[in-house]
Image: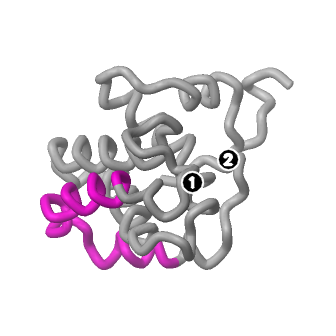
Amino acid sequence: MSSTDEMPGKISADMAAPMATPMAGDPGEHERYVQAGLAAKVKQTLGKLSFVREAVAAYFCARDPATPFKVKAAILAALAYFIMPLDAVPDLIAILGYTDDAAVFWATYRFIAPHISGAHRDKAAAYLKTAPPDDEIMPD
């Protein structure tokens, strides 16, 4: 299939390649990285980590055009760290593997929480009603 024939909502080869490596500092690249990788991480961690629902609500806040740029940047950086395969404490280590992800997210959450609206939380709840497929990208 060519890139123009690919099914919507699926990760193309062009999108999947950046997920294997750490991102550059470009906010647009952070946004694409998070959009491409968050669904699989949510599926992997839903019910295991206390902050997944808030992370998805934060994602929808970052996708909201009304959200200030600095808030979007903070959200995307925290979510990118959460889904990045290489981080300070490897996620494969039972229990301890996600402590650094949680610490980064909760530190950021204190700054972004006032910007997460009921509509963002409602979108997150609706999204989380069904487990996302591994190859789905996050919706807008």
Which residue is located at x 53 percent, y 53 percent? 93
> What amino acid is labelled 1 in the image?
Lys
Span highlighted in magenta in the image = 100-125
Q: Nearer the viewer, residue 40 or 98?
A: 98
- Give how far across and how far down residue 99 sits, in percent: 37, 59
49 left or right, relative to 117: right
Q: Which residue is mark 1?
A: 41
Q: Residue at x 36, y 21 (%)?
A: 24
Quadrant of res 139: bottom right
The image position of residue 57, as x and y in percent, is: 38, 66
> Would you say residue 9 is visible in this rendering?
yes
Q: Position of residue 135 (x, y in %)?
A: 71, 46
Relative to 71, residue 50 above or below: below
Q: Earlier in the sequence, mark 1 or mark 2?
A: 2
x 46%, y 42%: residue:
34
Name the amino acid, label 2.
Gly
- Residue placed most toward the observer, 26 or 97: 97
Quadrant holding the N terminus: top right
Residue toward you, 25 or 65: 25
